[in-house]
Image (tube, helix red, strand yellow):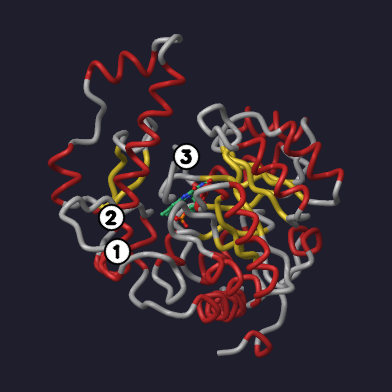
Amino acid sequence: MSQSSVRPISTAFTQLLGCDYPIIGAPMFLVSNAELVSAVSSAGGIGAAPSLNWRTSAEFREQIRKIKRMTNRPFGINLIVNQANPRVAQDLEVCVEERVPLVITSLGNPKETIKRMHAVGGKVFCDVTNLAYAKKVEDLGADGVVAVASGAGGHAGPISPLVLIPYLKKHLKIPVVAAGGITTGDQVAAAIALGASAVQIGTRFIATHESAVDQAYKNAILNAEPEDIVMTKKISGTPAAVIRTPYIEKQGLELNPVEAFLFKHPQTKKYMKMIRAYLGSKALEKAVAGPTWKEVWSAGQGVGLIDKIMPAADVVAELVEDYYKTCEQLPR
Ligand SMILES: Cc1cc2nc3c(=O)[nH]c(=O)nc-3n(C[C@H](O)[C@H](O)[C@H](O)COP(=O)(O)O)c2cc1C
């Protein structure tokens, strides 16, 4: 399957970003590397990675340069813009200086990111899970929102994509990107039919040749069913989607009462978030790197529809082909 065999899909998103397909390879902590990002972008979508996938801002800059050497197409970087991320200012500086085409913010206030990126011609989309926050980022000048719906990998929102996409579309002027559970071309067609200008796909891209994770994690994606996805507070304090493994079961999904108290207390909240995020990321790092009994594998409900590990470019091409097939086969 080659990219050139399939025609482009033109939407407000592709026009804004200058890409062929309205498909973002979602930024994924410890999963997205320069190879995955550049493969998705070269295939006509937008590959993206979180800045925190690299240990220092200097290393992050080097990897952006590597992505630029590997593809001349637009790509994206995810910045966590809340207080729990001590590197936000330095990493934003890198995005500005390196002229990153798309920044996807999550959590916190994206005002500074929008102002700085717009000054150098970059676009900023913000992860949202509800209308109030979506309105806020629209008022701050965001170019679009990523509607993170129920079923998503990472910090999934509570609202069904069937409702969240048209609901945000109805109340916003800026483009809406659909995220959560999307793994196939017919789901891309459904999201576009609901009013999305693009889709952001994470879990599907874990099971690719390029993704930076151990084979055991990729196999777990193939073997898991939607029923195996549970929400745990043990990683960051906020519910995050993981595959239910014996280790996750043993650990439990809730914070212990002392942690829960400290998480709510105004004087300890910030520090608890930082400590939990640190411990959670260490646990994820271990599980991503190689075989361990502490299996902490982050994934969304889309696992139920994934049965092959493929090159990322083939995933993009298959999504586009199936998108067109679905559109043609809909009953009149
Ligand atoms: C393993 C994994 C890691 C993720 N890491 C991040 C992250 O660092 N920052 C972020 O904003 N979203 C993160 N997400 C969420 C994705 O960017 C995306 O919104 C989500 O995966 C879409 O749902 P899907 O997995 O069902 O396709 C992560 C998701 C997964 C599965």
Q: Which residue is mark 1?
A: 217
Q: Which residue is mark 2?
A: 287
The earlier-in-sequence mark between 3 and 1 is 3
Q: Quadrant of residue 211?
A: bottom left
Q: Which residue is mark 3?
A: 157
Q: Is residue 72 left or right of residue 319?
A: right
Q: Quadrant of residue 11?
A: bottom right
Please state the horizontal and vertical placement of residue 91, each as a whole percent of the image. 64, 43
Q: Quadrant of the C terminus?
A: bottom right
Bin the neighbour count of mark 2 within 10 Å (Cα to Cα): few under 14, some 14-19, many 20 and up.
many
Q: Is residue 251 left or right of residue 315?
A: left
The earlier-in-sequence mark between 1 and 2 is 1
Q: Amino acid at mark 2?
A: Ala
Which type of secondary structure does the marked residue at label 3 adopt?
loop
Q: Which residue does the image show at 22% across and 50% down from the upper left?
A: 244
Please state the horizontal and vertical placement of residue 307, each as a whole percent of the image. 33, 75
Q: Do the residues bearing badges 1 and 2 touch, measured as CB atoms within 8 Å?
A: yes
Q: Nearer the viewer, residue 235 or 133?
A: 235
Q: Identify whether 158 is placed above or below 77.
A: above
Bin the neighbour count of mark 1 within 10 Å (Cα to Cα): few under 14, some 14-19, many 20 and up.
many
Q: Nearer the viewer, residue 293 or 260?
A: 293
Q: Which residue does the image show at 52% across and 60% down from the upper left?
A: 201
The alpha-carbon separation of the residues under discs 3 and 1 comes to 23 Å
Q: Nearer the viewer, residue 213 or 253?
A: 213
Nearer the camera: disc 1 or disc 2: 2
Q: Nearer the viewer, residue 250 or 10?
A: 250
The earlier-in-sequence mark between 2 and 3 is 3
The alpha-carbon separation of the residues under discs 1 and 2 comes to 8 Å
